[in-house]
Image (cartoon, coloured by chain):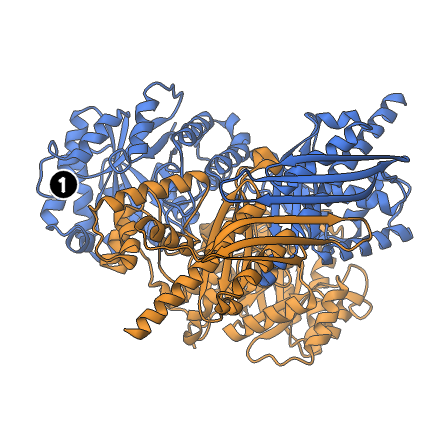
Chain colours: A orange, B blue
Amino acid sequence: MNNKIEVFDSTLRDGAQAEGISFSVEDKIKIVKALDALGISYIEAGNPSSNPKDLEFFTHMKKEKIKHAKLTAFGSTRRANVTVKEDSNVQSLLDADTPAVAIFGKSWDFHVTDIIKTTLEENLAMIQDTIAFLKEKGKEVIFDAEHFFDGYKANPTYAMAALEAAVKGGADWLALCETNGGAFPDEIYKITKEVVERFPVKVGIHCHNDGGMAVANSIMAVEAGATQVQGTYIGFGERCGNVNLSTVIANLQLKRGKHCIHEDQMTNLTSTARLVAEVSNVAMNEREPYIGNSAFAHKGGMHIDGVNKASKSFEHIDPRKVGNERRVLMSEVSGKSTVLSKIQKINPNIKKNSPETQKLIDRLKELEHEGYQFEGAESTFDLVIRKHLGKYKPFFELINYKIIGENQPGGENIASALVKINVEGKVEMTVAEGVGPVHALDKALRKALETFYPQLKEVHLTDYKVRVLDTTIATASKVRVLIESTDGYNLWTTVGVSSDIIEASWIALVDSIEYKLIKDIEDKIRAYI
Amino acid sequence: MNNKIEVFDSTLRDGAQAEGISFSVEDKIKIVKALDALGISYIEAGNPSSNPKDLEFFTHMKKEKIKHAKLTAFGSTRRANVTVKEDSNVQSLLDADTPAVAIFGKSWDFHVTDIIKTTLEENLAMIQDTIAFLKEKGKEVIFDAEHFFDGYKANPTYAMAALEAAVKGGADWLALCETNGGAFPDEIYKITKEVVERFPVKVGIHCHNDGGMAVANSIMAVEAGATQVQGTYIGFGERCGNVNLSTVIANLQLKRGKHCIHEDQMTNLTSTARLVAEVSNVAMNEREPYIGNSAFAHKGGMHIDGVNKASKSFEHIDPRKVGNERRVLMSEVSGKSTVLSKIQKINPNIKKNSPETQKLIDRLKELEHEGYQFEGAESTFDLVIRKHLGKYKPFFELINYKIIGENQPGGENIASALVKINVEGKVEMTVAEGVGPVHALDKALRKALETFYPQLKEVHLTDYKVRVLDTTIATASKVRVLIESTDGYNLWTTVGVSSDIIEASWIALVDSIEYKLIKDIEDKIRAYI
């Protein structure tokens, strides 16, 4: 294929250098499998000489099957004034036993003289020797020309000589690294084009986002003839991060006629991003292009009106192409029509000018003022509407709950919760223990209710999030708790706000249970009709 | 000045259309003042016809002094088939009483016929009439040509006719809007250049980030001759957001010789971003270029070694230029030298090869495995080192603590904490109430300790953050609690991890108090020497 772009993912190497990221061997294996399934061409998975965990990982990987990607080990050119064979770092690259190896070397003269403190000649020899040695051992070799663009701007002759040395060593790829991340797309285009025209070797691009232009820089390099794009799948890496590959893939494949991954895999872009974020234990930036939860979320009234008439009016692509979806947000700027569409799901007879509509909008604003956000908690919003319309009957009455926590050094640390409820005149009191007060409360409430509503046995929580709303008053601040629940078929999210984290959790827990019970009744009614 | 770029901020209008954003009138006033102090040229602060809160805000602003910026009201061209004078929306723009008005109109033929459903001719009249009317009233008028680039690609003749109508109406600015956010920098450059060459009117650019290229697109428009850049200060807006102006200002002013704000204000870029985020109640994306907390944070061993030798080796600019700072992160990939530098602050006699160094690195890895992160909690890390080196003596011994929470509907909701400690043989037991269990525990512990350490009276918490670490087991997950404390002079952060949020908070609270007490002793010793 003439328009093929090889995607080179470094989530497990450059990504591991991001603030807050720390991978276990198991995490790495999960991410390799996900990226391989998506059809990424190269997976740079670590530096076997810098880190014992990385070596353990590569040893493990010898037993794993990879369908598509080439696993790649990352390392440096040999040290100055030793032979390649004597260099233990280069040796450990061989021990990693991967089909491809990425070798970084210096192409900015200042780095040679002032950082690694060797001569300009020796640095060229280090590049050529190391690559030649690895080629002899049968490796595919990617030469990462570190700081290539800064180097070119400072001393173009030397920067080109570094590439020349790599070509003489037999490198398969010249990957031009915009290491400090501050370059502009017009520079990247011009310099990349010069390299592409000069050397008979494939060219790659490796951008960082310190100027906020890593995506554009990578795309402009491709326009100039680069056929490999290095980055990290959701963009985290040293400092401001690497280029976000999920964005690059979507841009190139949906809009520039390039082929990055198999067409059938495009709809997995979003779910793969979620998985990588989850395994990496980072909160996704939800405004991330294509894959973010907000990427196709509409809030302005005219935007909502527009997309309802034609998707392309306010969406640059159909979100389904990348496995994402449109969301219409609730808020004071979203206008009556959004609130109305939610109301009409529950009572189709209510109109835009019905007094209930305005009253509900007022109630919504009141709750937002208290700290509620319904954008991520549609089930609580559903209950707010029902309560407002009189389409709600409580399933139980709380008499009280008590929390007891006790901690002594060395002793067991257990929280207990006591819950007393009334269901149609029958009082039930239960107690349960948990690893913390919220866990105990969750268990005690379910225990009390399962006697009356056995279907609650199927329900369990899949996510629990806490947001401190006003950090200026510290431990006395309000908190917002979001709870995501499932019964194995459906997933729903509820929210509670209070100064007391236990009470905020309680509110969200009760909503979660009530939502399930209401849905069950409605399903039964529908089945009966 | 020939190289002047007018920065046009829409945080309070397009930014308010972002998911999770809701401004009060007070919030808006705070943000206007911050942006004005920074030297932003235009502040688009709302749509007076769409939202009563915005009208209240504009009414209030008549009494406020703005030093530098032009306050701008935003609205639409008149509706189809009415005169401008009859249009209440246009009237409310006048009521807002701002020196500048931004008027959006359609320039994509499809939007005219399929979304607002009028004729192509009437739309041109709507643009020209509305602008002419506002010019008569003495306003500076910015014409926002909505969907201009998509419109140009679909029907260049019509898109240009829309601009022509605005010029005939007397518009001061033609702002080219890349409303759907999916365009590429090469297209933006080419099309903007054509507009700049064709019309004798100043040109602006308004980009969204749906393709992850809003910064590059805005810069390329400036290269093509645009002299106004519209965006939001930290980038939030509808869907993936608007272009991040803090990045655009830094890129243009530090690297492209453009003048956006006063040179002296450049060092306020970072603090202004923090303020905007704080008032907007959004978590900053810490990887944001220039202004993010991670923007100059180094983790890889070779990077840390490099910046210690010369800043430019791994930093595209000196972070102080934008009021940010370099950070060196603790982690398993940061190498011995980072850990060593922290150890040597406490005991300068310990060397790289001392057995203590390796043991401490091992302990660090163990704690990271448990869920600790020291990157944001240097004070806890300081205590870990002290404990490890035997440079630590506990200030009190915990005997136990108990938490009692009780809740009944309608009743008061109070948490109590009981704390029993031993200080050099003297047992003290205290009880305190709080709005939640952590607040109660904090108060009870301080009450117990203040008898022995009266200096703790000066200490209070300034921030309290909760992060759920493993969301797959929901309420039984581990949580990490970060506490930031101050005594009025210093600020320090500590961390605790546990499955029980109360215990995690306790660990961080105890560290906060111990760190304060140790620092006080050291200060006294230093004063004595």
- Amino acid type at circle 1 is Met
Q: Is residue B391 above or below residue A83?
A: above
Say which element carries label 1. Answer: helix
Expressed as whole percent of the image width and height from the top left, the position of residue A346 reads 30, 58
Report the side of A330 relative to B416 (left or right). left
In the rendered image, the quadrant that contains the C terminus of chain B is top right
Report the side of A321 relative to B400 (left or right). left
Foreground residue among A462 and B4: A462
Residue A255 showing in the rendered view: yes
Expressed as whole percent of the image width and height from the top left, the position of residue B105 reads 21, 43
Expressed as whole percent of the image width and height from the top left, the position of residue A364 reads 36, 44
Foreground residue among A181 and B1: A181
Which of the 4 image quarters holds residue A93?
A: bottom right
Q: Is residue B432 above or below residue A283?
A: above
Expressed as whole percent of the image width and height from the top left, the position of residue A75 reads 70, 64
Tell me the chain of label 1: B
Q: Which residue is mark 1?
A: B126
Foreground residue among B263 and B494: B494
